[in-house]
Image (cartoon, rainbow, N blue to C red):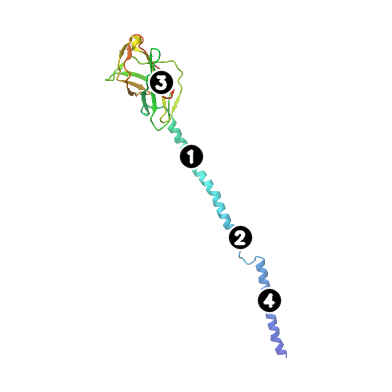
Amino acid sequence: MANTSQPVRRTALLAGGLAVLGLLSACGSENGTSGTPPPSHSARASDAAPSAGTATDPGTAAAAGTPSDTAGSASASARTDGRCHTSELRAAVGRLDPGAGQRNFPLVLTNISERTCTVYGYPGAAFVDASGKQLGPDPERAPGSPETLTLTPGASAWAGLSFSSPEISGARTATPAALLVTPPDERASLKVEWTAGAVPVGGNASSVSVTALEAGSGP
């Protein structure tokens, strides 16, 4: 009888030990001591990664755009600085605007360049014959208040060219082949064919006058 009870007790003790070990393992898992992070931690870290990238991208784009914007402003400034040069302009003589014993013509300068430039003051003007010889004296400057005019590409400025009608004044006349127009502060001239007949070149009442440039293409 003694031999039969000892194996039974050993079996009972072994079963009890296994039960206690199982309880300890279960308690350790519930207290987070297993070393494996809960799945929810991994989910939060994954969500945070795109947010950080989004915050960085706009800042990077703004920093990259700043030098480009500055360069664009400097480039625009360079295109709009300085007066209009002869090579950047086209000259034309507008239609006759007759007055009381006067003949008046608009001299039109048009910006044909790709940049914005300025003109200020009086243009030069000279009638010439077919050989290029000047006919008559230089025009006189009519009183006025010149202003700096900004010509964008394609824009124009005009000055009035006036003289007394030779038929009325009795001045000595000649028929020019062309009119040379010199933009303000320039040396080179623009040649425009003259088709408006005789002009005064000598004697009394033979003066020709020119006005300061104004915006537009004429009255």
Q: Residue at x 55, y 50 (%)?
A: 54
Q: Residue at x 67, y 77 (%)?
A: 18
Tally the marks: 4
Where is mark 4, residue-wise?
19
Q: Distance between the Cα atoms at labels 1 and 2?
A: 44 Å
Q: Identify the amino acid type marked 1.
A: Asp
Q: Residues within 10 Å of mark 3 (few under 14, many from 20)?
A: many
Q: Which is nearer the N-term, disc 1 or disc 4?
A: 4
Quarter location, residue 109: top left
Q: Position of residue 25 (x, y in %)?
A: 66, 71
Q: Distance between the Cα atoms at labels 1 and 3?
A: 39 Å
Instruction: Give the residue at the far bottom of this rendering.
Output: 1
Q: Identify the amino acid type marked 2.
A: His
* Quadrant position of the C terminus in the picture: top left
- Identify whether 13 is placed above or below 3: above
Q: Nearer the viewer, residue 136 or 196?
A: 196
Where is mark 1, residue-wise?
69
Q: Which is nearer the N-term, disc 1 or disc 2?
A: 2
Q: Which is nearer the N-term, disc 3 or disc 2?
A: 2
Quarter location, residue 4: bottom right
Quarter location, residue 7: bottom right
Q: Could you say whether the residue bearing mark 1 is in a helix, strand or loop?
A: helix
Q: Distance between the Cα atoms at labels 3 and 2?
A: 81 Å
Q: Position of residue 5 (x, y in %)?
A: 71, 87
Whether the residues at callouts 1 and 2 have beta carbons within 8 Å, the answer is no
